[in-house]
Image (cartoon, rainbow, N blue to C red):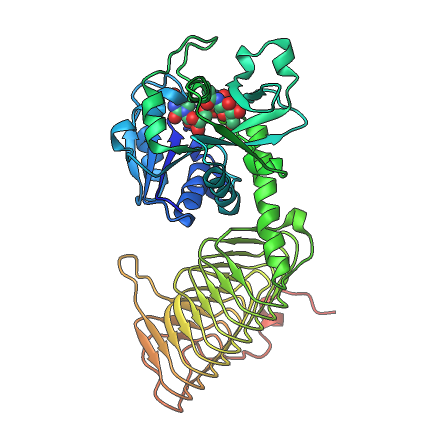
């Protein structure tokens, strides 16, 4: 295959979106739609990826990865005008692959087929096309009586007969670099929209007796252009289903694919079961045989094997094998659980390491802590890590027992086998193997109730 230079158009405003932000950075499955297109170009190992930006260019630059070249199109005078801005950065030979930033569902497999078709047919340009049920809004592929592609007619410029054509232009093309550059200088804006259309290159090449190919694909969803919020939701649905289908093919059970939201980069092992209402985002990996119960949200986290999570939120954290979490637990950034740790209901963990087989079964806050192995954190324990100015660390060593409703006022260390009586507010280190009691002593005053007359005695 020859060298590929990818050009992605992303300068338009996208007025039909009715939005303050540029259309191409509206997200599909948590990623700007133009980024999906850039990813495809990069999967194809394009030598160079040029992104043409204009409307809201700063916002577009900020939203996308920086391994691309940006070219500014100051005024948006049409797709042809956008490509003209790149002409000095285009090579003199090889393929120029042109894509629009508003077709996020395209796959690199399809583009590879397009390029092979282009090379085998020795075409000057090849258009990716499809037959669609409703061609409204798309450019139509006009062919002559011998079925040769002669031109592309925009919907707004089409006559009644041309509007009947159901083969449409996807906006994805492979050109011979040299012939594209030659044709750019011949574009004009003699059309209904007074725009320079890149689609006119087809007619220009045809008039000069160059062959233009059309590679027709079956799955029209891949080339769906997103121009409105309704199409954005449709693209989201298609991409989401594609991600879930891949996971299911790899052995993950997804109970209700209509109600499960998983990002493209997420990896999940065999025999893991995902319940409805689950959201898994970013750079997350989940191992085998896990149960991710309903309404969990997991972001940028590593969950190893055989972990059971119910209705909980886990962000930027690591959970080792055989842990159980929730319901209603919250693992905030930098929580690290060892093997077979139990984090029960209404337990919040932040910036804390918890050793193998330790438990915090109910209603606790564990912040800025290092907890050893086989430690028991009773119900309602609070790691008092903040003095209003600074955060301080708590260390609880192996086999310690922290009684219910204890406050551990950091900085503090509980040594191995330290044992804290329930209801204590601990402000001094607990030595190895000792019992610490830090609460008011109980006093019983006989006959007090009757003397004071606070409660009536029958
Ligand atoms: C375009 C095609 C149409 C095709 C359809 C497929 C043209 C003239 N028409 O129509 O044949 O069927 O896509 O989805 O190409 N852009 C710029 N600068 C501009 C204008 C547009 O960068 O001056 C970018 C937009 O940001 C967008 C892309 O080009 O990503 C396509 O523009 P859009 O206005 O959506 O074209 P369509 O009317 O959909
Ligand atoms: Ca479009």
Q: Which of 231 and 166 is in front in this view?
A: 166
Q: Looking at the image, how many numbered discs can be counted on the residues?
A: 0
365 up-or-down from 201: above or below: below
Q: Depth check: give the residue in front, 183 or 51.
A: 183
Residue 444 is situated, as x and y percent measured from the top left of the image, at 54, 79
**Residue toward you, 202 or 408:** 202
Q: Indicate whether 440 appears above or below 390.
A: below
Task: Using the rendered view, name the quadrant where residue 69 is placed.
Answer: top left
Name the residue rendered at 63%, 53% in the picture: 245
Say if 231 sits above or below 361 in the image: above
Q: Residue at x 30, y 29 (%)?
A: 86
Q: Residue furthest right?
A: 458
Residue 376 location (% of width, % of height): 49, 80
Vertical relation: 391 (above or below) 169: below
**Nearer to us in this view, 46 or 259:** 46
Position of 322 with respect to 70 (left or right) is right
In which quadrant will I find the C terminus? bottom right
Q: Where is residue 154 in the image (x, y as percent from the top left)?
A: 52, 17
Q: In the displayed image of the protein, which residue is found farthest to the left? A: 88
Q: Can residue 178 be seen in this view?
A: yes
Look at the image and tell me whether residue 55 can be seen. Answer: no
Where does the image place residue 327, in percent across and percent down from the top left?
Answer: 60, 63
14 lies left or right of 182: right
> Quick one: which residue is furthest to the bottom in this view?
433
Tell whether 271 sits left or right of 169.
right
């Amino acid at each position: 295959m020859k060298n590929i230079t990818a050009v992605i158009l992303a300068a338009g405003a996208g007025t039909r979106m009715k939005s303050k932000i540029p259309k191409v950075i509206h997200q599909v499955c948590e990623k700007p739609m133009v980024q999906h297109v850039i990813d495809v170009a990069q999967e194809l190992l394009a030598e160079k990826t040029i992104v043409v930006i204009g409307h809201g260019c700063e916002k577009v630059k900020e939203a996308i990865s920086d391994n691309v070249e940006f070219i500014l199109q100051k005024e948006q005078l049409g797709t042809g005008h956008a490509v003209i801005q790149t002409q000095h950065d285009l090579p003199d030979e090889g393929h120029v692959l042109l894509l629009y930033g508003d077709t996020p569902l395209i796959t690199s497999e399809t583009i590879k087929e397009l390029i092979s078709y282009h090379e085998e047919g020795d075409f000057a340009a090849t258009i990716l096309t499809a037959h669609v049920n409703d061609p409204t809004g798309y450019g139509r592929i006009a062919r002559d009586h011998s079925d040769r592609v002669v031109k592309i007619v925009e919907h707004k410029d089409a006559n009644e007969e041309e509007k009947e054509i159901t083969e449409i232009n996807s906006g994805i093309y492979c050109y011979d670099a040299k012939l594209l550059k030659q044709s750019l200088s011949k574009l004009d804006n003699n059309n209904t929209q007074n725009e320079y259309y890149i689609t006119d290159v087809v007619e220009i090449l045809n008039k000069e007796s160059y062959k233009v190919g059309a590679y027709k694909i079956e799955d029209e969803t891949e080339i769906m252009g997103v121009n409105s919020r309704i199409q954005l939701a449709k693209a989201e649905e298609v991409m989401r289903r594609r991600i879930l289908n891949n996971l299911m093919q790899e052995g993950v059970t997804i109970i209700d694919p209509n109600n499960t939201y998983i990002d493209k980069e997420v990896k999940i092992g065999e025999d893991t079961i995902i319940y409805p209402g689950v959201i898994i985002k970013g750079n997350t990996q989940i191992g085998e045989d896990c149960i991710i119960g309903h309404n969990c949200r997991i972001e940028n986290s590593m969950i190893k094997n055989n972990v059971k999570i119910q209705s909980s939120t886990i962000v930027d954290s690591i959970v080792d094998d055989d842990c159980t979490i929730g319901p209603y637990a919250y693992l905030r950034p930098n929580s690290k659980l060892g093997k077979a740790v139990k984090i029960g209901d209404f337990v919040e963990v932040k910036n804390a390491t918890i050793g193998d087989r330790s438990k915090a079964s109910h209603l606790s806050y564990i912040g800025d802590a290092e907890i050893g192995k086989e430690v028991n954190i009773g119900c309602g324990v609070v790691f008092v890590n903040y003095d209003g100015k600074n955060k301080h660390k708590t260390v609880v060593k192996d086999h310690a027992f922290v009684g219910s409703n204890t406050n551990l006022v950091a900085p503090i260390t509980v040594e191995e086998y330290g044992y804290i009586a329930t209801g204590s507010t601990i402000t001094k280190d607990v030595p190895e193997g000792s019992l610490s009691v830090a609460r008011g002593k109980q006093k019983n005053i006989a006959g007090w109730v009757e003397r004071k007359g606070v409660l009536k005695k029958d």
